[in-house]
């Protein structure tokens, strides 16, 4: 069995390989919404029948202090935004794991001190 420090170091190397492309990350979450145009006689917006127009896509970003910014996303950018949101989630997940490994490494190195 390998030394624990070597094991943890190898694990950290694996985790680093799972880091997404940091240049693409976007915060927030993507929501969809139907919208009503309120034009009289619009069959999409008819009361009780129509579902409205859409869906339109909205990137909802928390700014802290209970403030949220909602940014409409054109459909041609939706896929790219989704990828960027996944990259952000992946980054956070891997970052936490690396920090945890480093914590274990610190403990192990303390234990191995002469
Ligand atoms: Zn309408």
Image (tube, rainbow, N blue to C red):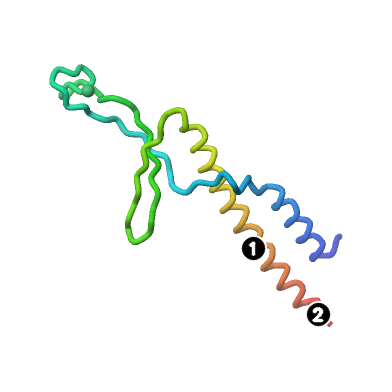
Residue at label 2? Answer: 113
Quick one: which residue is furthest to the right in this view? 1
Along the line of sight, which residue is nearer the eye, 52 or 100?
52
Q: Are marks 1 and 2 in contact (CB under 8 Å)?
A: no
Provide residue 110's location: percent of width, then percent of height.
75, 77
Figure check: 26 above or below 76: below
Task: Determine the quadrant in which ligand 1 lies.
Answer: top left
Q: CA distance from mark 1 to mark 2?
A: 20 Å
State which quarter of the image contains the C terminus. Answer: bottom right
Q: Is residue 62 above or below residue 72?
A: below
Nearer-the-camera pick, 76 or 82: 76
Residue 64 location in percent, x, y?
Answer: 37, 59
Quarter of image, res 45: top left
Q: Quadrant of the N terminus?
A: bottom right
Q: Which residue lies under the disc numbered 1?
A: 100
**Going 21% across and 27% down the picture, which residue do you hit?**
37
Residue placed furthest toward the bottom: 114
Residue at 74% across, 51% down: 14
- Looking at the rendered structure, the secondary structure element under dot 1 is helix
Sooner in the amino-acid sequence: mark 1 or mark 2: 1
**Relative to 41, does residue 104 appear above or below in the rendering?**
below
**Quick check: 48 left or right of 105?**
left
């Amino acid at each position: 069995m390998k030394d624990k420090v070597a094991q943890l170091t190898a694990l950290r190397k694996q985790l680093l390989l799972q880091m997404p492309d940091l240049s693409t990350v976007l915060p927030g979450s993507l929501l969809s919404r139907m919208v009503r145009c309120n034009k009289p006689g619009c069959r999409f917006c008819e009361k009780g029948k129509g579902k409205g127009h859409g869906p339109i896509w909205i990137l909802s970003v928390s700014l802290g202090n209970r403030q949220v910014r909602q940014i409409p996303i054109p459909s041609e950018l939706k896929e790219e935004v989704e990828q960027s949101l996944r990259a952000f989630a992946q980054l956070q997940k891997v970052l936490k794991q690396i920090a945890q490994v480093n914590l274990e490494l610190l403990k192990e190195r303390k234990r191995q001190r002469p």
